[in-house]
């Protein structure tokens, strides 16, 4: 159940889930991978005695199409 909540509300695990889904992995395989990733993260947090820190959001890059570019002024 924790893995299901994590893929909905945790941006790190949500991105991981979406990446595996895009590769065509079965749902149960993805959930087990998310569970394992959660355990690895939690184990590292305990080992280093650190609380969860939300990573900085990645800037979104929006590709510009050639046809959408502004026209050059004619002099």
Image: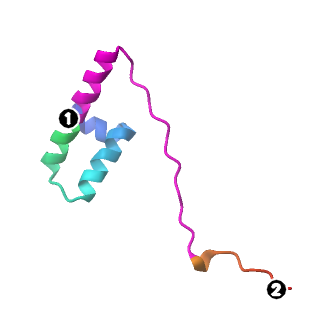
Q: Is residue 18 left or right of residue 26?
A: right
Alpha carbon separation for disc pair 2 and 1: 59 Å
Residue 41, position in %: x, y? Answer: 29, 28
Reply above or below: 61 against 3.
below
Depth check: 75 or 52 in front?
75
Query: x%, y% of residue 25?
Result: 17, 55
**Rendered residue at 43%/26% (across/down):** 53
Tell me: 51 left or right of 71.
Answer: left
Q: How is the image coloured?
A: rainbow
| Position of residue 43 measured from the top left corner of the image (x, y, whole percent) | 25, 22
Give the residue number, with chain letter if any, for mark 2.
Answer: 74
* Residue depicted at 52% across the width and 53% down the height: 60
Q: Position of residue 73 (x, y in %)?
A: 80, 81
How packed is label 2: few (under 14 Cα within 10 Å), some, or many (20 or more)?
few
Residue ranking furthest to the right = 75
Q: What element does badge 1 sit on?
A: helix
Report the magenta residues as a range.
37-65
Mark 2 vs mark 1: in front: 2
Residue depicted at 53% across the width and 48% down the height: 59
The quarter of the image holding the N terminus is top left
Does residue 43 lie above or below 34 as drawn?
A: above
Quarter that holds the C terminus: bottom right
Q: Which residue appears farthest toward the bottom when viewing the image?
A: 74
Report which residue position mark 1 lands on.
35
How many C-alpha atoms fall within 10 Å of the one at disc 1: few (<14), some, or many (≥20)? some
């Amino acid at each position: 159940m924790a893995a299901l909540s994590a893929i909905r509300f945790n941006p790190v695990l949500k991105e991981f889930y979406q990446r595996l889904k895009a590769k065509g992995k079965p749902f149960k395989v993805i959930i087990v991978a998310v569970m394992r990733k959660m355990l690895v993260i939690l184990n590292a947090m305990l080992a280093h005695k650190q609380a969860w820190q939300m990573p900085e959001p990645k800037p979104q890059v929006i590709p510009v199409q050639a046809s959408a570019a502004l026209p050059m002024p004619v002099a």
